[in-house]
Image: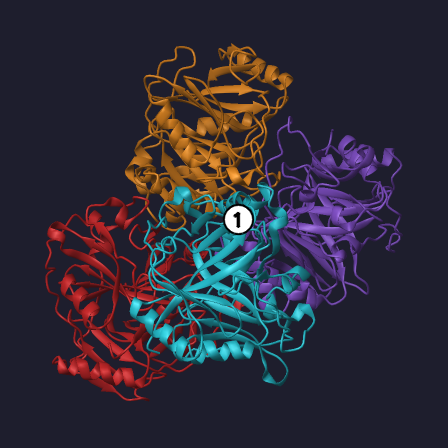
Chain colours: A cyan, B purple, C orange, D red
Amino acid sequence: MSFDIIRSGRAVFHVTDLEKSKQFYDALGFIETEATEKEVYLRGLEEHNHHSLLLKQRETPALEVISYKVRSEGDLDKLAAKLQREGNELIWLQKGAQKAVGRAFRYQDISGLPIEFYAEMEAVERKLQHYHLYKGAKVQRIDHFNCMVSDVEKAHNYYINELGFSCSEYTAGEEDKIWAAWLHRKPSVHDVAFMNAPGPRLHHVGFWLSDPMSLIDGCDVLASLGYGPSIERGPGRHGLSNAFFLYLRDPDGHRIELYNGDYFTGDPDFEPVRWELDDPMRQTFWGHEAPDSWFDEATEVLNVYTEKKVALQEAKLKKRKPTFVI
Amino acid sequence: MSFDIIRSGRAVFHVTDLEKSKQFYDALGFIETEATEKEVYLRGLEEHNHHSLLLKQRETPALEVISYKVRSEGDLDKLAAKLQREGNELIWLQKGAQKAVGRAFRYQDISGLPIEFYAEMEAVERKLQHYHLYKGAKVQRIDHFNCMVSDVEKAHNYYINELGFSCSEYTAGEEDKIWAAWLHRKPSVHDVAFMNAPGPRLHHVGFWLSDPMSLIDGCDVLASLGYGPSIERGPGRHGLSNAFFLYLRDPDGHRIELYNGDYFTGDPDFEPVRWELDDPMRQTFWGHEAPDSWFDEATEVLNVYTEKKVALQEAKLKKRKPTFVI
Amino acid sequence: MSFDIIRSGRAVFHVTDLEKSKQFYDALGFIETEATEKEVYLRGLEEHNHHSLLLKQRETPALEVISYKVRSEGDLDKLAAKLQREGNELIWLQKGAQKAVGRAFRYQDISGLPIEFYAEMEAVERKLQHYHLYKGAKVQRIDHFNCMVSDVEKAHNYYINELGFSCSEYTAGEEDKIWAAWLHRKPSVHDVAFMNAPGPRLHHVGFWLSDPMSLIDGCDVLASLGYGPSIERGPGRHGLSNAFFLYLRDPDGHRIELYNGDYFTGDPDFEPVRWELDDPMRQTFWGHEAPDSWFDEATEVLNVYTEKKVALQEAKLKKRKPTFVI
Amino acid sequence: MSFDIIRSGRAVFHVTDLEKSKQFYDALGFIETEATEKEVYLRGLEEHNHHSLLLKQRETPALEVISYKVRSEGDLDKLAAKLQREGNELIWLQKGAQKAVGRAFRYQDISGLPIEFYAEMEAVERKLQHYHLYKGAKVQRIDHFNCMVSDVEKAHNYYINELGFSCSEYTAGEEDKIWAAWLHRKPSVHDVAFMNAPGPRLHHVGFWLSDPMSLIDGCDVLASLGYGPSIERGPGRHGLSNAFFLYLRDPDGHRIELYNGDYFTGDPDFEPVRWELDDPMRQTFWGHEAPDSWFDEATEVLNVYTEKKVALQEAKLKKRKPTFVI
């Protein structure tokens, strides 16, 4: 590739009660970089970029966009040129149009997801060693996006062949069809995952924690602050990805994964790990089932051109017993 | 009281496949003190008494007896005399009748539970600092018995007024009826708990772990050895007792709780903590529901005189939505 | 015994800059129950009694008194009578004389240590499940006092034979002389320890943490707040007691131990663990040496009758290489 | 760069008693992939390449070589060509010459260190989810090399400008001279660090653990197996790199670091963190001093052409109080 996508960069959520959302993410242990009347900019403790989660006060909850950071302005231009050659319409946002973010462009990707690329984001102080600020689940940094799409194989192939992603693990069902795929640019398990389901939707944004106890501490603090009902699933261990996980629902139902237990995937000879759709250890290594909401509910996404919600398409592979779908 | 019950001492389980059970408890991290063709004697890493769990090969799974350790032979005699005065028939087992256990007597308690008292058990080497033997969940010591009984209030009153237990926490429902009670002799949350349900049955035996990570490690090791389906509930945090818990089912369905997060209850001015039956944080501080099996299934207990199973009696308080029963 | 000492209850420190001390203990994770211009009352997260550490603003740093909680007012009277029979002069403090503490008496014990007994202390809300208040090392409760005395054997014998303490572990040197002893009333490793050194002095007050990660978190938070130089020794593992430990010096040099990794000592047949003075694993299981300050420095104690400092007496057993003295 | 160095790959140690070394690394939790009479091949739990540590039985302890993995055979050739153009003599080892390793070449780098590059290493089963095999410190994967060199600035500049490394953190002394530098290819804090000292020598090889408790568990297991004296320094937190660290000496004195607490450095706009040589928090965030051995002792390295030890050169920057040198 002539361009280099570095990593998943940020998500932009529409929320209906900014104050309520702010309190929730504060309880979780995010650092608030900055807030205006209509927007809150959040980051993890080790992040040196301005934010990795942007909340905007709006009428209805939605995902406005998920964003990837690319290496340089040159990489951004080359990527833009390539996408235009393929027939995509790009919406350019010049530096200054968005707080703290440099030049960026948005488009609707091959699955209908609202995607943004940018190279530059304002630097802020890393709080990694400001341990007295650690609280809640001590969120360290953004890790990945997990998206429900109607055609996983198409998304998988495009991200690998055209955008330079690598596959770390995947789920295959009948006739070797790819049911779900974990793809990365940084050498972790993923920057983005695609799962077979009516889409495009955002299933969750994953944030990385530095150790398993932070996840337990996060549960305790959330519960003692009255956020018990926000804990949707976990703590548990995924077979696929080996993640020690917790899934939370924010006040608008946006799903956040707290995540620990990654491994290094940067070797070119790393072979993607294949999981059978029917392997009960795939979804939860310890064998527990996820609640229905985890399979059925997800954040709707916006059309970057019209700012309306994108209509859902049926999943291409037929639906399976929820227990076995991840 | 003229006698001093020290703590919960051991449980005697009947199992149908001794080898299978042995492997399960070995995976969990128990130390095997000794084994014969028909019996396996297990203890935790810090225990200096011969065993806290005795497995006997039998045709059907059952609880043979739960045992409490008393201070001295003199205490044993005084306790026996008192129980006989109350009209209980005692079965005496002389020293030597049971491996490693001194004089003991058994009887059916006020709830119909098979109970044993003893003062003496053979001493063995503590493995507390043999860290190279730590594995699985690194089980440290027996902590408590949890029993389902048909009349919790009766059991609660008897154990407190007649046997010298104290109440650390309890659940009260309509008209202040005691729904469940946690009682202790050693200054922890409990040596025994009683829950309103058809009984008498043994719900679980609790073993203490020295830290929360041992519980997570236990899940991972059990799962990697194929015991994923044995994990019934958790990890989670109980509101009541503050325990960080995991519930397992052994190959015969006997339930074991791994438990961390106790607190000190030895002050005479410690006020029992009251929980409302309808408080969702009581059962699970983090708000998750337990599976039906956790409410419905338990180990049947034997009649110490006939060695037959004790018939169940209906719970005195009416059944409530499982989510709210602990 | 006709009286029942429950546990170590509180320490009263004289500090020279109340505000500075307050900030230090706040960073450590203590709960401030109450403060006046001259006094700060602190407790751990699970404590339901008003305080376990009392700081008083004074000209010079010192230990005013260490206090034990007894079962009842009757126990207090019986203990007082016994001590008076032995020729001790008692200073009575009536209820109301001290904030939150009931009737109490003080005297200078057999080693010259200023000791107080009380039965009653005002109840306050336990913060055990207020996880959002957890910070620093998340101090849970007072655990023990460690005292330097000139004649360990005399103190050991008196506390066991006359006050009803039990010995969990001890260090023996040449000719089986007891070099140091760990004694308990509650069934943990200790409520008080005595070490051979010029005394009487208070070496440290130990506070219990619920898990090892809280100790690591405590180090990180203290360091990020500039208290790095307050960390005197650890984290490490004691062979004797199996404690995972950290030793801190407060702004006046008073030493606090953060402590995790206890075990149950409540069995009457528990045999005290003997350690040889020359066993390198006794002091630190992992083999590290303690700094000289840990051996040489300690808090001077006050005479309860004159409120002047008690003069030091030489240790009865001859001094040994610091590495091997604990 | 036209070539892509992926990461630090393996170290080859000469040891004088293979059996003793094998036992030590086994206690630490390494997986033994394969052993011959004269060689032991070790890897961490998540590693899918044949080994990351190779022990060879020899007369005297030494570092034979440290090796980096490059992307492909093509990258290997391009890198070789560049180094030859610069006047370096390369020793080629064809595929099959070394067990499990493909084509490789060795040379003495700009600091006199014996370096090897290879693209291919035999794949083996990852044990990441074989939790029942976890033991000791549960070593996950190789992380970095730390080398003592006489001219840090020269090494720093060459690795960055000529080999494509990036700097994450560095220590600067008087006149802004670089005293020590942490350089990476994979987006972690480092693949290699250079420290100002008589060199070339290998200070240590760092292995990554998945969580802080594994480090504590490692200490306990090593101590209970009699390896207490092998624990040289720690556990502690480095200010520089934020690592939660433990330094061990193997039976020949080779130093191993167990390491947890890294952060992501893959952003092109990540600014290297500068530490002042005199900042006491740099070396140990919690403020403790390292023992003299940690500063003075290190593994001597071999000349790849003669297989004799490389003579030491004095450090270019003058020696400073050990407390402040890292």
Quarter of the image where one finds residue D297: bottom left
Say whether residue B85 is visible: yes
User: Is C106 situated left or right of A117 in this image?
Assistant: right
Looking at the picture, does residue D31 appear above or below residue C270?
below
- Identified at 23% across, 52% down, the residue is D274
Q: Nearer the viewer, residue A4 or B17?
A: A4
Residue B30 position (above or below residue C154): below
| Residue lying furthest front | A306
Q: Amino acid at mark 1?
A: Gly
The residue singled out by tag 1 in the image is A218
B272, B48: nearer the viewer: B272
Q: Position of residue B232 (x, y in %)?
A: 69, 59
* Residue C34 placement, left or right of B90: left
The kind of secondary structure element at disc 1 is helix
Q: Compare residues C316 and D240 and report the one nearer the observer.
A: D240
Query: Residue A232: x, y in percent?
Result: 62, 55
Classed neighbour count for the residue bearing mark 1: other residues with Cα under 10 Å, few (<14), some (14–19), many (≥20): many
Q: State the count of labels.
A: 1
Image quarter (top left, top right, bottom left or bottom right) of the C terminus of chain C: top left
Horizontal relation, residue D168 to residue C158: left or right: left
Chain letter behind tag 1: A
> Is D231 displayed left or right of C188 in the figure?
left
| Residue A277 found in image quarter | bottom right
Residue C280 percent location from the top left of the image:
37, 48
